[in-house]
Image (spheres, rainbow, N blue to C red):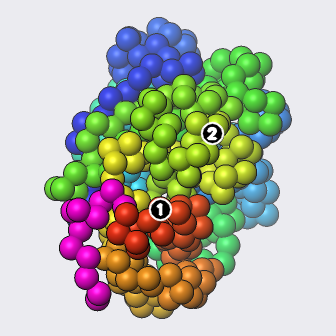
Amino acid sequence: MIRPPALVDVAPGPLLLSGLGGGPGSAAHLSRFGPLPDPDADHLLAQFAPLAVRGRGGAGFPMARKLETVLERRSSLPGRRPVVVVNAAEGEPASAKDTALLEVAPHLVLDGAVLAARAIGARSIHVVTAADRQWAGTAVTTAIADRQDRGVRWQWHEAEPRFVSGQARAVLELIAGRTGLPVTSWAPEAVDGHRGRPTLLSNAESFAHLAAIVRWGAERYASHGTAAEPGTTLLTLTTPPQSDGRFAGVRVVEVEHGAPAGSVLGDEALRAPLLIGGFHGSWVHPDDVADVRWSNAHLRRVGASLGAGSVLSLATGACPVAETARYTAYLAAETAGRCGPCRNGLPALAREVEALAHGVDSRPRIEELTGLVRGRGACAHPDGTARLVASLLTTLDDHVEAHLRQRCSCHADLAVEAL
């Protein structure tokens, strides 16, 4: 079992994490920002769309396009009032950015949700947090009780502590009163969401960015980051989970897009394998880590993306083969079990990666299985798991070879045996 961190250190940042000294309460928030503006949809999109801000939940879909799609769907279905959903279920155990943001700056997230709701004509705002991150639920309910938002009704939900509970359709199942697990859908949530209504669903950080743009203005927001990727992003910096499965020494930081890896990583981390994007992310080779910049445009060159914003370093000397086997076994156990790739493919893949960790050259079978599970699941869980494993074989192929030749640093701790 792998579990999210119990304690998280949050560092001050340039936008979302600025001004934390005043505390998370509404009085400090209003003192700093003043009353919430009330832009209509056209004004909101005029500020938001040119910045090409993408969602920070992992998929990276343009937020403005989501808003536009909801508005288009609303006009074609006048009797189906839109809904806003703040997804802070954060099933990724190596990530803590959304829950940390709700704890230190909840009203910035809720401001973004209110701005979106007013723009699209929604009256209901649903906020979802995870049962194994109870401090986030406490922060949300406290903040909601401290607000006076006209024209909107808040509803808070608690998701089961499962990796797939944060998947968009799983969240919609939860708030509809059903089991919060992914289901097959042929339309995006913005078209066919909660109870068939057009639904603006994004993660907590995404709504905070929307509020930051309206609160500070597009010009100030764009003064951070790059021309192609303006603004900032939150990262969760961590190392592999401990023997009890709990992450420790976790730090949430805010970086400008395009900032170098060394702006937040220490010297040892710059010389070690790095897993970027969480358990559905990709490994980056130690030779490339020092040159990494925190932007998707740059990360694509090394086969990675920001994804869920989790950055896991093996500066501790941990073995990437053994760690990948550990994460793959966890992911195989965390499926909804509703489609073939999850019921059969991922457990088979986990067994082969475990064999690799024990010194068996199972690479041909691993490559076969990653190809078989991709693009065939009801959600992206099989794809993300295959991405993690494939990046081990391609990006860290030299580490895999050393491991198989018993020259890996972990060899003394492994009982190498043929399975």
Q: Which residue is mark 2?
A: 292
Q: Is residue 38 visible?
A: no
Relative depth, front residue between 139 and 82 = 139
Q: Which residue is mark 1?
A: 399
The answer to whether mark 1 and mark 2 are in CB contact below 8 A is no
Residue drawn at 49 percent across, 28 percent down:
264
Q: Which quadrant of the figure has residue 6?
A: top left
Residue 41 spot, x, y in % from top left: 75, 38
The residues bearing labels 1 and 2 have C-alpha atoms spaced at a distance of 20 Å
Give whichever of discs 1 and 2 has the lower sequence position: 2
The answer to whether residue 109 is left or right of residue 319 is: right
Relative depth, front residue between 277 and 118 = 277
Where does the magenta region start and end? 408-419
The answer to whether residue 142 is left or right of residue 206 is: left
Q: Measured along the vertical axis of the image, is residue 79 above or below residue 138?
A: below
Residue 81 spot, x, y in % from top left: 63, 56
Q: Residues within 10 Å of mark 1 (few under 14, many from 20)?
A: many
Q: In the rendered structure, does residue 413 fall within the stretch colored magenta?
A: yes
Q: In the rendered structure, does residue 97 fall within the stretch colored magenta?
A: no
Residue drawn at 47 percent across, 73 percent down:
182
Count the marks: 2
Residue 413 spot, x, y in % from top left: 21, 62
Q: Main secondary structure of the magenta part?
A: loop
